Image: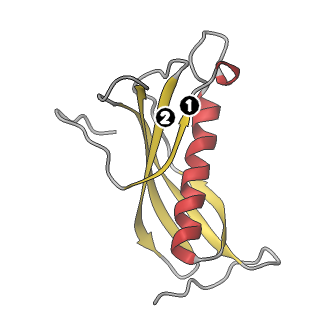
Amino acid sequence: MEIDDNPTPTGELALSTYALPKDTNAHGNISAGWIVSQMDLAAAIMGEKATRSRVVTVDIEQMDFVSPVKVGSVIDIYADIIEIGRTSLKIKVEVWAHKYDETDSHKVTDSQFVVVSVDKQGRAQIIKQD
């Protein structure tokens, strides 16, 4: 992840949720696994919106967590389609966090997700582009 002097989210807000006590690890921070699952949901929302079909995640690039998330934080997840293939989309997903009563967000992590458009039988299908 690149260091930015004045970071701002890129992409479209795909998902916003609260980090709750049930989502913590043994140290009281929000679990990385929970954050990844929220990123996966955001990628699916963006992928299904773009393809107008079901999508499945087939790849997640490496991610580094640059700041912890505390209980009670609002998690905003931004997604941006960066590549459209024959049956797949590559989507950049960023996670930002802030307290409900604050306007300044901090970046938590980002990654690229690859999702594949699938038919009702779960087989890859060609993405129809208008």
The residue beneath circle 1 is 18
The front one of 103 and 107 is 103
Residue drawn at 49 percent across, 22 percent down: 69
Left/right placement of residue 59 relative to residue 93 reads right
Left/right placement of residue 72 relative to residue 105 reads right
The residue beneath circle 2 is 75
The front one of 85 and 71 is 71
In percent of width and height, residue 16 lies at 51, 42
Q: Which sits earlier in the primary sequence, circle 2 or circle 1?
A: 1
| Image quadrant assignment for residue 99 | top left
Looking at the rendered structure, the secondary structure element under dot 2 is: strand
In percent of width and height, residue 100 lies at 43, 26
What's under tag 1, amino acid-wise?
Tyr
Q: Which residue lies furthest to the top in this view?
A: 27
What's under tag 2, amino acid-wise?
Ile
Residue drawn at 45 percent across, 90 percent down: 130
In percent of width and height, residue 87 lies at 58, 78
Q: Which residue lies furthest to the left in this view?
A: 5
> Dot 1 surroundings within 10 Å: few (below 14), some, or many (20 or more)?
some
Residue drawn at 42 percent across, 30 percent down: 97
